[in-house]
Amino acid sequence: MRAWVLLSAVLWYLTGVGWQRNSERTEKGFIYGKPGHPVKVYVKLHHNSPVLVCMDFKRAEKETVDPTYLWVGPNEKQLSGNNRINITNTGKLTVKDFLEPLSGLYTCSFSYKTIKAETQEEKIVKQRYDFMIFVNPFAPGWKGTCNESTDCEDTTNHNILQARNRIEEFFRSQAYIFNHDLNKTLPAMHFVDHSFQIVRMDSCRPGFGKNEGLHSNCATCCVVCSPGTFSPDVDVTCQTCISVQIYGAKSCQ
């Protein structure tokens, strides 16, 4: 009687994450603000942010007279263009090579003139738009597998699925051969039908965690720990620490 050995393969499986939730996005990929409602944006670590527009979608479809834009960053200081921050003349903001300390609240103050046709009276209208930007990182160990890939996440997922298919094909071929040739010696390790599976290993890198309450529209995302929390290891949650005042804290100090 043949002795069957159960083989179970455990591999990483990670889903892709969109950059933006709870906001209005055009076919150009611009993210517009919503008056009175902070827009949450999720940016991959070391990637550029999407284009944030200092205007709501409805306002953008109308003519605007003498508009002005003022962006303020997480440190409550006015933002200006540099090698990391790009602000256009039309109030569009992009943050390049996004890192954990860049997370937080980005606020834009937008003002424009309205003119009454009957009296030609001018009035200044002001509006504020808030964007909460968080970092979504790669999983541990991806640097070594991605080489010079432009999107490490997609490359890793593709490689994992390829590995799964090749492993599955190997054992299925082996099973077919031994089922049709009883004279062959059964190897010590072989495939049993329905025993091969992919198991998701849920973890986040230090300084990141998952929070379904705070990030309900990105509940499976590993998001940078907010001030007041930290994560020292590969756990999936950020722990409370009132002394932490930065994003991405790895210890309670």
Image: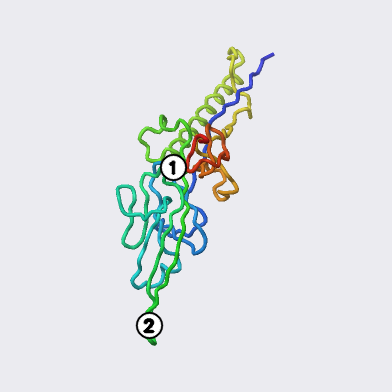
Q: Give the spatial CA distance, label 2 vs label 1.
A: 47 Å
Q: In which quadrant will I find the N terminus?
A: top right
Residue linked to disc 2 = 121
* Residue in the foreground of this view, choosing between 176 and 120: 120
Q: Residue 240: x and y, percent? A: 58, 40
* Residue in the foreground of this view, choosing between 40 and 143: 40
Q: How was this image coloured?
A: rainbow
Q: Residue 107: x and y, percent? A: 43, 57
Q: Which mark is residue 182?
A: none
Q: Residues within 10 Å of mark 2 (few under 14, many from 20)?
A: few
Residue at x 32%, y 58% (from the top left corner): 88
Q: Quadrant of residue 91?
A: bottom left
Q: Which mark is residue 100?
A: 1
Taking the view exactly as shown, the residue that stands out farthest to the bottom is: 118
For the residue marked with disc 2, what is the amino acid?
Answer: Glu
Q: Earlier in the sequence, mark 2 or mark 1?
A: 1
Residue at x 48%, y 35% (from the top left corner): 139
Q: Residue 4: x and y, percent? A: 65, 18
Callout 2 secondary element = loop
Q: Residue 98: x and y, percent? A: 39, 44
Asked if residue 232 is positioned above or below residue 187 in the image, the reply reads below
For the residue marked with disc 1, what is the amino acid?
Answer: Glu
Q: Quadrant of residue 59?
A: bottom left
Asked if residue 237 is positioned above or below residue 27 in the image, the reply reads above
Q: Residues within 10 Å of mark 1 (few under 14, many from 20)?
A: many
The total of numbered circles placed on residues is 2
Asked if residue 169 is positioned above or below residue 137 in the image, the reply reads above
Callout 1 secondary element = helix
Residue at x 63%, y 22% (from the top left corner): 6
* Residue in the foreground of this view, choosing between 151 and 244: 244
Asked if residue 248 is positioned above or below residue 5 in the image, the reply reads below
93 to the left or right of 24: left
